[in-house]
Image: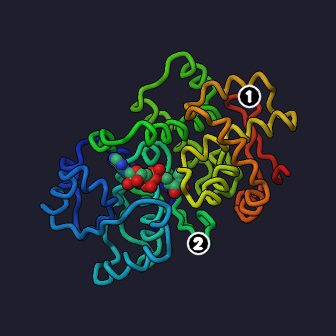
């Protein structure tokens, strides 16, 4: 079955060294900013005569309109094509939906994550989705990628705040799933390379046990996402995904303390360890003033509950939402 669960193969190397591995018809869907910042990516695709669709990244690209645009462009290509998704999480998410639905599923899907967030999180696990009517990820698929190309040279153009977003998602993985590594990282901060390897390994392990989210195990990956998604939505995506998840993790710690699930000492040490932006607490307080709007979005969200932390490495799913 196209997109059926399999562990995706992680391949490291420079982009132009990996392109010659491609065989048969290929459609590349790429973030136009990445093409601009990294002309070697564009050149490598052109050298192999690969059909290229350049898209502007951001939540708006995760839309039915983009799916139609990609479909029109690919109409004459065969079903068995290889889809190369080059970009951050937004390009990866919409490309995954396209991979699953184009002529009922393409031959191969390869992710080339270009943000740290995509490398640590969104390019692992096979989920793809688009946003409809202001609701994030409401139409989506599971479609496992065959490969992920980790091309370190493309990460050199990321800003500090873009890096922080990826680090936040990586710490989310470690704090919920790996107490030993969390303790180690609190003593010596990991390099971004280490973050990528560790969080991919942790996420792969969870996804392998619950690839289609039927066993209630994958939900742990939503730590911080219930409020995070709601903040993204009501800010009309001005607050970026990683930043919103950081605020959502603070909120989940607070709710945990309130419900007696998380001790104050655990909440404080976890909060200190997270690579949050300065002023995150004040920002959270500001957003929580919009309780009615947040509540409405959280109700429409498919998660239907919140992940709370007992201590690093131990989590619980709390059915229902606060308020
Ligand atoms: N499918 C999943 O499992 C999963 C998991 C986590 C997050 N997500 C989704 O991922 C999305 C967020 O991902 P993102 O933060 O990568 O978003 P993004 O794709 O919008 O990228 C963020 C910004 O970085 C720019 N960019 C990309 N690569 C760059 C580079 N190498 N140098 C400089 N700038 C670069 C983009 O042009 C964009 O402006 C959200 O939509 C979120 O819902 C999905």
Residue 180 picture location, percent across and down: 60, 22
Residue 72 picture location, percent across and down: 35, 82
Separation of marks 1 and 2 at Cα, in angstroms: 35 Å
Residue 101 picture location, percent across and down: 46, 75
Which residue appears at 57% of the width and 20% of the height? 186
Colour setup of the view: rainbow
Q: Secondary structure at mark 2?
A: strand
The extreme left residue here reads 47
Which residue appears at 65% of the width and 53% of the height? 231
Q: Is residue 248 left or right of residue 323?
A: left
Q: Is residue 230 left or right of residue 194?
A: right
Task: Mark yes or no: residue 88 visible.
Answer: no
* Crowd band around label 1 with a 10 angstrom C-alpha radius: few (<14), some (14–19), many (20+): many
Q: Is residue 113 left or right of residue 247?
A: left
Which residue appears at 65% of the width and 59% of the height? 234
Residue 192 picture location, percent across and down: 41, 32
User: Disc 2 marks which residue?
Assistant: 132
């Amino acid at each position: 079955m196209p997109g059926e669960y399999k562990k995706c193969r992680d391949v490291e190397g420079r982009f132009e060294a990996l392109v010659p591995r491609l065989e048969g018809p290929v459609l590349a869907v790429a973030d136009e900013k990445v093409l601009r910042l990294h002309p070697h990516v564009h050149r490598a695709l052109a050298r192999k005569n690969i059909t290229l669709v350049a898209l502007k990244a951001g939540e708006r690209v995760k839309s039915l309109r983009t799916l139609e645009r990609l479909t029109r462009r690919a109409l004459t290509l065969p079903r068995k094509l290889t889809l190369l998704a080059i970009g951050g999480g937004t390009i990866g998410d919409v490309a995954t939906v396209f991979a699953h639905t184009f002529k009922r599923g393409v031959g191969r899907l390869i992710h080339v994550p270009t943000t740290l967030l995509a490398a640590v999180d969104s390019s692992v696990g096979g989920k793809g989705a688009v946003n409809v009517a202001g609701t994030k990820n409401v139409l989506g698929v599971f479609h496992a990628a065959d490969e992920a190309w980790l091309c370190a040279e493309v990460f050199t153009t990321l800003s500090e705040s873009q890096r922080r977003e990826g680090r936040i998602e990586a710490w989310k993985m470690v704090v919920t799933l790996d107490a030993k590594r969390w303790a180690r990282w609190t003593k010596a901060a990991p390099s971004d390379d280490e973050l990528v390897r560790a969080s991919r390994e942790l996420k792969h392990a969870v996804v392998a046990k619950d690839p289609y989210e039927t066993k209630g195990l994958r939900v742990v990956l939503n730590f911080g996402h219930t409020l995070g998604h709601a903040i993204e939505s009501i800010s009309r995506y001005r607050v970026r995904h990683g930043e919103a998840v950081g605020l959502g993790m603070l909120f989940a710690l607070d709710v945990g303390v309130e419900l007696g699930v998380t001790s104050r000492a655990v909440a404080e040490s976890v909060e200190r360890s997270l690579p949050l932006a300065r002023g995150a607490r004040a920002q959270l307080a500001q957003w929580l003033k919009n309780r009615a709007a947040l509540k409405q979005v959280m109700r429409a969200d498919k998660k239907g509950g919140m992940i709370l932390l007992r201590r690093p490495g131990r989590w619980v799913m709390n059915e229902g939402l606060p308020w």
